[in-house]
Structure formats: structure tokens, C-alpha cells
Image: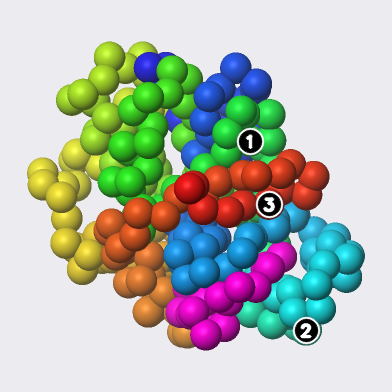
Amino acid sequence: MQLMTSFLPGLNPVDDGFDAAVVIDILRATTVMTTAIHHGANQVVTTREIDEARSIASKMPSDVLLCGERGCVAIEGFHLGNSPSEYMPERVRGRDLVLTTTNGTQAIEACSRAKQVWIGCFLNLSALVENLRSKNRVALVCAGTNSTITGEDVLFAGAVVAMLSPHSNLELNDESRIARTTWEGLFNTFPTPSALAEQLKRSQGGRNLLRTGAYEGDVERCAEIDWTTVIPHRVSTLPSAFQRIQ
């Protein structure tokens, strides 16, 4: 397997030679998408721009939910923000969602040429790794925060590389090796959610959330390893729409 990690969208181009691209925005877009699909959302449609999200929603069923954030804060007039705790079954089951976020939806766009695009987070870590084992070329694309590298996304990429390493003949780029070293330098064994949450709180994304005074619980939620086996995957490209792998 050729495994390429990109610490920011666009640093390493993802072309149609990649069997799968995994989008990583641990705090919080990919965690939100996974939670929503796990709880029964029909699909999550993603877009970079707020006005485009409104335009897409206007062409969908009347019960569509507009979702997203800018600068960690829910967008005025939207139904839901970017907090996983908002995406409970009673709110999202059977609904279509349109999501725009500061960083995550940009990373999704950067992966648009890959044959498959999957959504990764700690909630579906082991299921994701198992599904990657059969692929020949894989890209792990970190969203970062405002065009800067963030530790929480690098940690997740490192966990994926470390879990694949004992069972695969891997060809790694330098960012994959750095990510794996970062993960293994912090955790000799699979961490508890509380231990992982402490590391996430020290990352740039974690500090940004804690600074708001409102989202410490989100960080802990995003550290719940293997909470689900659901992997949202892209089913259409214009606009990008994600459903669960069947």
C-alpha cells in the first residue's frame, strides 16, 4: 500500500490515482458527520461557503437542516452548529443535512478527485482501518485550522498509520512517518478516551474550542475511540454528499 499523509489540504495533491482519500477534521467536522450518519441522517451534503449551503438547502426537501460554524461558533440562522452533541437521533434521523465549516469542508473539496472519499475520526478509527486494508493507494488529508497544521488531525493520521503498519507492506511519505512517530511517542498502548482527550485539549484546535468557554464537552466527545463502525463515504461529488458505507 502507498499511504500518503497531507498535514494540510493541497500540500500533497490527491488525484484520481488514489483508491481512497480519508478526510480528517477531528475537532469537529468529521466527528459531527460520523455522529449524524450513525444516528440516522439520510445524508450530509458539504460545501465550503455559507451562501452556497443556503442555496443547496433551498433545492432540497423542506425539512433539510442547515448546519455548520465559522470560528467555532454556530452560523446565525442555521439549525445546528458544529457540536457533536447537537446531532442526536431525535434531531437528525431521516433528515438531509447541509454542512459548511471553517476547515473540514475545504479538506473534502481537496479530495474531490479520489475514487472514494471517506470521513475519519476517532469514533470510527478501527472500522476505518479495516476498510483501508484492501486499498492500494490511500491519502490521509488533515483539515488543519485556518491553514495551519493542528496536532489533533496529525494524531489521528498517526493512529491510522500505526494500526496499518504491522499488517501491511506500506510505502509511506515523510508526513505519514512523522504522524506515526507522534502517535507512538504519546501512546504505547491504545489510549483511554480521557487520556486522548487531554492530548486533544493541548492541540491548536482543542485550545481554540476551550477558549470559547463552551465546548470542552465536545473535545471529550471527539475522543471516544471506536464508538461506532459507521464510515460516511461520498456518494456524489457536485455537491459532495455523504452516506454510510453499506
Residue 107 horizontal/vertical position (percent): 62, 44
The answer to which image quadrant residue 132 occupies is top left
Image vertical order of residue 33 relative to residue 140, above or below = below
Whether label 3 touches label 2, CB < 8 Å: no
Dot 2: what SS?
A: loop
- First in sequence, mark 2 or 1: give its number: 2
Residue bearing mark 1: 111
3 in the magenta segment: no
Residue 8 makes an appearance in the image: no
Per the rendered image, the range of residues in magenta is 83-98
Residue 5 horizontal/vertical position (percent): 46, 30
Tag 2: Cα neighbours inside 10 Å, few (<14), some, or many (≥20)?
few
Image vertical order of residue 88 relative to residue 165, above or below = below
Residue bearing mark 2: 77
Residue 162 located left or right of residue 27: left
Nearest-to-viewer mark from 3 and 1: 3
Q: Hey, what amino acid is under mark 1?
A: Cys
Dot 3: what SS?
A: strand
Dot 1: what SS?
A: loop
Nearest-to-viewer mark from 3 and 2: 3
Q: How many marks?
A: 3
